[in-house]
Image (spheres, rainbow, N blue to C red):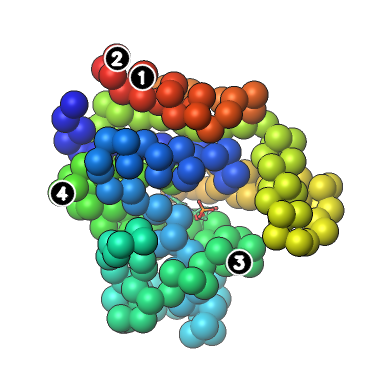
Amino acid sequence: MNFTNGIALDGPAGAGKSTIAKIIAKRLGLPYLDTGAMYRAMALCALSEGVSLTDAEGVDALLRRTDIRVVYEADGQHVLVNGADVTGSLRAEEIGKGASLISKLRCVRDKLAAMQRAIAHETHAVLDGREIGTFVIPETPYKFFVTASAQERARRRVQQLREKGEDPDFELILKDIEARDYQDSHRDYAPLKQAEDAVLIDTTNMTIEEAVDAVLAALEAK
Ligand code: DC
């Protein structure tokens, strides 16, 4: 199969899309691009430089003086900000919330989307994000919208945190998930939304393997 222009997997936080995207990329021998990590890196950079995540002018100036790069190493994708590898600091809850906020700014999205588009065209990667199919590579015929009910996503998140030895509150996690969904899908510019020609994969009652099989079958059918 020839995936010129890349493969797009969009959907809300916690639906399993990054796990599915990584497996699909491995099976097809393609790179995997976690686009959320790039928004997280910009949020981390703004926070550490004391730039407000909602200050469009301040963030625009920050973008101009910041060199952000994605590189691949044996253990996968790394994000470098001005040469420093920030990959290990990106998964904190606060950074995820910050990424959702900073991603509302058009200057951020334009810069990161242009980088993502170039990577997709060059490497035919599997990209996971929010608006890959509608905005970053709308030209690809390979689009998926991976979702699950908010209740199920909260249940999975609680389970993950328990496995890490934490004692999370289900209602709080659910509220956070709903707030992030709302923010990502109601921003003015390139919001989270299913592309008209995307295949819907609802993982609420599916295992990861079943979801992977559904994506692979849809790719083969194209
Ligand atoms: O997938 P994630 O949780 O790492 O993404 C963090 C935030 O970054 C998400 O809430 C919105 C933003 N984001 C985006 O706007 N577009 C993308 N392609 C990926 C992430």
Q: Residue 218 carries which label?
A: 1
Work out whether mark 3 precedes mark 4 in sequence or the reverse, and give the earlier one: 3
Distance from label 4 to label 2 (Cα)? 24 Å
Work out whether mark 1 precedes mark 4 in sequence or the reverse, and give the earlier one: 4
* Residue 196, percent from left and from top: 40, 23
* Residue 201, percent from left and from top: 50, 25
* Residue 51, percent from left and from top: 51, 80
Position of 128 relative to 45 (above/below): above
Q: Is mark 4 within 8 Å of ligand 1?
A: no
Q: Which amino acid does label 2 sit on?
A: Ala
CB under 8 Å between callouts 4 and 2?
no
Q: What residue type is labelled 1?
A: Ala
Q: Residue 221 carries which label?
A: 2
- Is 212 in front, or is 186? 212
CB under 8 Å between callouts 1 and 2?
yes
Distance from label 3 to label 4 (Cα)? 30 Å
Q: Residue at x 82, y 59 (%)?
A: 167
What residue is disc 4 on?
A: 122
Callout 3: few (<14), some (14-19), or many (20+) C-alpha neighbours within 10 Å? few
* Residue 138, percent from left and from top: 29, 35
Work out whether mark 4 precedes mark 2 in sequence or the reverse, and give the earlier one: 4
Distance from label 1 to label 3 (Cα)? 34 Å
Which dot, 1 or 4, sits closer to the camera? 1
Q: Which amino acid does label 3 sit on?
A: Ala
Q: In this view, does 59 lie to the left or right of 207?
A: left
CB under 8 Å between callouts 1 and 3?
no
Q: Residue at x 35, y 30 (%)?
A: 143
What residue is disc 3 on?
A: 92
